[in-house]
Amino acid sequence: QVQLVESGGGLVSVGESLRLSCEASGNTGAINSMAWYRQAPGKQRELVAQITRSAETNYADSVKDRFTISRDFAKNTVWLQMNNLKSEDTAVYYCHADSWGIVLVDYWGQGTLVTVSS
């Protein structure tokens, strides 16, 4: 089992920055990749950024060159640095991890709200 706890959400203005954190606990040694997803009101949850165990990253086109995902294995923590925020970035942001057991298992945090006001 893996537990994920996000922090860092809040209310910011367009153009400002925010940094989200996600700390993993439990069976962290089996974690494969970690990622941030988001879900805006009335929309489906979408992948924002992902980082693999080998530190390869993948970003949604809408956040490339503005968001940066990073990971510290020793601290079992992943961050999402969000710069030049836009109103369309408003959403609940969820931390995700997949972890090897018999099969790959998905884990989710409780979510943290990011509101970007224009």
Image (cartoon, rainbow, N blue to C red):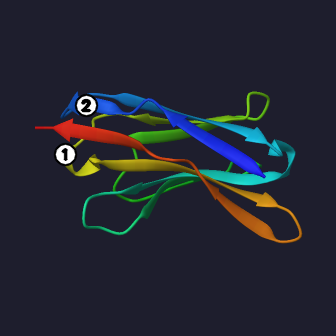
Expressed as whole percent of the image width and height from the top left, the position of residue 99 reads 77, 57
Q: Is residue 31 above or below residue 83?
A: below
The residue tagged with tag 1: helix, strand or loop?
A: helix
Q: Is residue 58 above or below residue 80?
A: below
Q: In the drawing, does residue 31 fall left or right of residue 48?
A: right
The mark nearer the N terminus, 2 or 1, is 2
Residue linked to disc 1:
87
Q: In the drawing, does residue 9 fall left or right of residue 34?
A: left
Q: Which of 11 and 56 is in front in this view?
A: 11
Q: In the drawing, does residue 101 fall left or right of residue 4?
A: right
Q: Quick check: marks 2 and 1 in contact, CB under 8 Å?
A: no
Residue type, label 2: Leu
Residue 18 in sight here: yes
Expressed as whole percent of the image width and height from the top left, the position of residue 76 reads 73, 34
Expressed as whole percent of the image width and height from the top left, the position of residue 56 reads 67, 51
Q: Nearer the viewer, residue 107 or 49?
A: 107
Residue linked to disc 2:
11
| Residue at 33%, 56% in the rendered image | 62
